[in-house]
Amino acid sequence: MKIAVLNGSPKGELSVTMQYVKFIEKKNPGNDFEYINISQRINKIEDDPDLFGEITAKIADSDLVIWCVPLYVMLVPSQYKRFIELIWERGSESVFRGKYAAVITTSIHFFDNTAHNYMRGICDDLGMIFTESFSPDMYDIMHEEGRVKLLQFADICLKTAGKKTVTPKAFGMTDYCMPVYEPGDSQVKTSAAGKRILILSDRRYINDNMGNMITRLQSAFDGNVRVMALTDIDIKGGCLGCCECGFDYQCVYTGKDGFIDYYKNEIVTSDIIIYAGEIKDRYLSAKWKQMLDRSFFNTHTPTLQGRQTAFLISGPLRSIPNLREILQAGNEFQKANLVDIVTDEQDSAATDMLIDSLAARLVEASNAGYVRPQTFLGFGGTKIFRDDVWGRLRFVFQADHRYYEEHGFYDFPQDDKKTIEINEKMMALTANPEMREKVRKMTKAEMVKPIKAIVDTK
């Protein structure tokens, strides 16, 4: 069987994820594995149509395509995202149609689900036949159980493709055609006195829905609003996954382009940040992904605590709940307050009202200093990093460790001595069947008792 492996790591052959596929190849002799470094060579692939054609020819000649990619900020790296965009931009969808597909990623399970949903959606959109996905911890291959699961995954993929088994699609096709947005005059302006407001887009939008939405929101504020685009910033490239920033936030790009200074001087210093962009291939643009990946020079340290954020999006967000989850999760992990997301999925008058309302709510929340409690998305994500930075990743991410120690991130339940003592006493007490029945009947009232006392007295 001919297998095309599309390597999504900017590190090329030094990719952890690639070692998983190499192990599969070793244990499945007789198959022809063709490795294609995508992310590492994305600039040349984009600039050289012949190289892009060589890659698609190899894919066309394959029986199975393995999307092999590490996870960067809840998705694939920006370089890989750009390759996916090129598929549609260059009309190469037919190369993938009918091909069997598999996805393998490695991570520490920080929103690997959203990355896999994204890749499954891309495979469905390309008309591929999905075999299986595999999302191990990056070190699972070090253990016998992890290797067994990996080979079971490979066996499923090879048999599904070899037998030409039919599998269902997970996601329906998305309609990217939005109603034309023609803004009306803003009747009421929201006073933003004393607030530093930034509207940041991935590129300059002119005479289109996104451009009109940005202009309308800017005019909805009574005060100075900075409107900037990522294309105006000197960004040399995407995150390389080198983790050099882990010791002291010093990125390999430090002093080589303008992104880090821009992030520190413009984004972090803003009170209100509105991100603006259009949906491309079930996500925002590769340029947006590049910005999010490059912000990893802060590693796993939140930098936008207390900021008010929002999104202006052109495109079918209501049809892509996976993207909404990504946007919400990223802001919750940052401990920022995502006020809302406004799209152009309704008529112009309704969009006007939503934009005006958004401006008012952003300022109100900023004045109040309001940040809603984290849901599972932010709370669970924070605990994943808490545990790994405290443990196996502490050496690599020393900057995170110092920050987490100083800011109380290490709130492990086994360190709560008072709770431990209470649990031990109550468990010993309820070991007696008669006492257990008495306590059982008291549970409801006792659970609410301390909370009710606060309600009654404060």
Image (cartoon, rainbow, N blue to C red):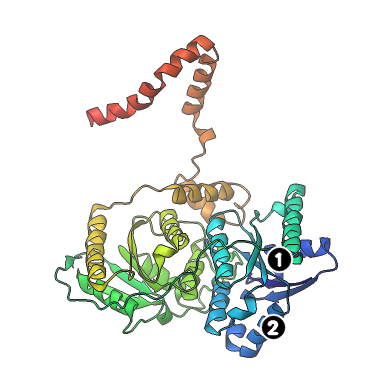
N-term mark: 2 or 1: 1
Picture layout, residue 14 above or below residue 152: below
Q: Kindly identify the residue that appears in the image at 23 percent across and 76 percent down.
A: 183
Camera sees residue 270: no
Point out residue 318 in the picture as x, y percentages from the top left corner: 39, 63
Three-letter amino acid code at disc 1? Met
Quarter of the image with the C terminus in it? top left
* Residue at the spot of label 2: 57
Q: Is residue 357 left or right of residue 152?
A: left
Q: Is residue 33 left or right of residue 292?
A: right
Three-letter amino acid code at disc 2? Ala
Q: Which mark is residue 366?
A: none
Residue 307 or residue 64, whichever sits in front = 64
Picture layout, residue 11 above or below residue 430: below
Quarter of the image with the N terminus in it? bottom right
Q: Which picture quadrant has residue 356?
A: bottom left
Q: Which mark is residue 18?
A: 1
Point out residue 307 in the picture as x, y percentages from the top left corner: 33, 59
Alpha-carbon span between mark 2 and mark 1: 22 Å
Is disc 1 placed on a helix, strand or loop? helix
Picture layout, residue 227 above or below residue 250: below
